[in-house]
Amino acid sequence: MRAINDAGAHEAMVYNNRTQHKAQDWLRRHKLDRRSLESLDSKWKVSGTSGRRSMRSAAGTIVRAMYQCACGYHRNVRQQRESKGEASLDGEEGSYEAGGIDDGNGGWTRRAPYAFTGCLAHADITFVEENGFVLRIKAYLKHNEACRDAPMIRFPAVPLHPHVICVAQQQLRGNASVSQIRNKNLELLAARAYQDQRTTEGANANHRYNILSSNFRSLYRRHYREHYGININVAPELNVHNWLDEDSRYFKPTLRTAIFNYSARMTKQDRAIVCISTAEMRDAAWKYCHGKQLVMDGTFGLCDSRILLWIAMGVDEENSGIPVAMFLFSAPTGSKATHTGYNTAILAELFAQWRDWLSLPENRSASSDPDPQAVFAPAVAMTDTDAKERGALLRTWPSIILLLCRFHVRQCWTNRRGTVLKSLDATWRSRVESSLQALEEALLDTICYEDTVRLLHRQEDLYTQASSEGPDAQQAIAAVKEFVRYLRGTWMAKEMWHSWARQGRVDAASMMKIAVEVVLTTTNHLESFNGKLKVAHI
């Protein structure tokens, strides 16, 4: 191709209003007019993911399309390019008919209807999309002999009708699932409700109306490209870097202003870090979290890459959760599971950067502390039982009151209780389980540490008195003692007790000067947000 270009072997033509008839005649002669290109047996295909680019102008949408002879396409080239994330960043997707598909074994299967012959014929055409007005053509049209004699060796793929794609895209914008899109397609198909469906003869149609499983990849790519401006053919880290690089033509100022901490992953030892807080989130952090309650939690399974997400949330006057910051970072190389890819140090580093960024003069809002030297600091933090997360919060804000989500505490106690009681017979299991559940409720409601100690002793003494009732009773006593040992060993350090007992909420209410009933007891606001984020937005 380079030799052809250097030798000046291309035809190059520029057209205007007076010469449009010549342009259209040229397209028809070489089967590059719109009607010929729509034919399923056409040899011309858009070249790869960067083969079609467009821009708006006063004359309409200016499109530059590179058409390549199907006999000059080799599937290995695209496979290697996509595996390296080297697709174009411009967001246009090429024709899938000429491409290949992953065969499931790391190789690709050719789908083009013609065999590869090494043909170099191609045409670079610039035109106005709305009316087909041709502006420029640069082409090399010397098909090699093998190409000229090449027969069709497989049936060409039949593309989806544009209206089918349009309906599916509307559903995706409404967060529809794959099954919902498939059901809608079957419903409209049965009703013959798609455009042109009633007048199209199936045997002669150049489009089809039934969505296949293999179409969803293309539908999702189009959705992300058109709705979000994201080309998922490109490696994610390249997309992010170009959006945030002020020297890149893909730079997105709005996105850049929403990110207060970005670090690219340049080597295997690095973490990719993206910390997000929009202007609205920044103001909400000062209004609802500074000197007040902060809810913090991490979520995993965000995507098929090893990415972790921590979310900070406040609660507004309507008792609704308001996200105030998101901390997105990659697990280090060598992590066997995503949820093991973090420690107290990385969380403390990110939380401290958020604190320092919010405390800058330019990031204060009308809801900020009137003291211009004040450092952003929540009074109370509600978390689950993650010790690394709690340690990071204490490193960042040493005076913060840490509270534990009661749901997560009871979940831990319930799981342990089930384990120690599983070998008891039904009668004793029911009796002991009711007693231990009452103990747990009493423990959570304590406001004096010594009362908690006494409750545990009383529970042990209660069942010691039943030791004469036989072997089943002895087994029940052992189970109770094991559960009490678990509570003492895991949950009874005084700082830990303060996090889950009522006394912690009383102290939190006193610090914030609010009623104890207003102090959060669970991380439910954030758990709900996580669920919506994963299901509806990712």
Image: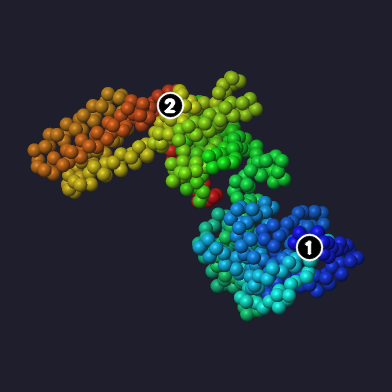
Q: Position of residue 81 (x, y in %)?
A: 63, 56
Horizontally, is 300 left or right of 451 in the view? right
Q: Nearer the viewer, residue 390 or 266?
A: 266
Position of the N terminus by quadrant: bottom right
Q: How many marks?
A: 2
Horizontally, is 193 left or right of 502 in the view? right
At horizontal 64% and vertical 68% (from top left) the residue drawn is: 97
Q: Position of residue 6 (x, y in %)?
A: 81, 59
| Kind of residue indicated by mark 2 | Ile
User: Does residue 241 sit above or below 183 in this rendering?
Assistant: above
Return the disc, 1 or 2, that comes first in the chain's sequence.
Answer: 1
Q: How packed is label 2: few (under 14 Cα within 10 Å), some, or many (20 or more)? A: many
Q: Which residue is mark 1?
A: 4
Q: Position of residue 278 (x, y in %)?
A: 61, 37
- Secondary structure found at label 1: helix
User: Does residue 311 sit above or below 535 in this rendering?
Assistant: above
At horizontal 46% and vertical 44% (from top left) the residue drawn is: 335
At horizontal 53% and vertical 61% (from top left) the residue drawn is: 106
Q: Position of residue 454 (x, y in %)?
A: 23, 27
Q: How packed is label 1: few (under 14 Cα within 10 Å), some, or many (20 or more)? A: few
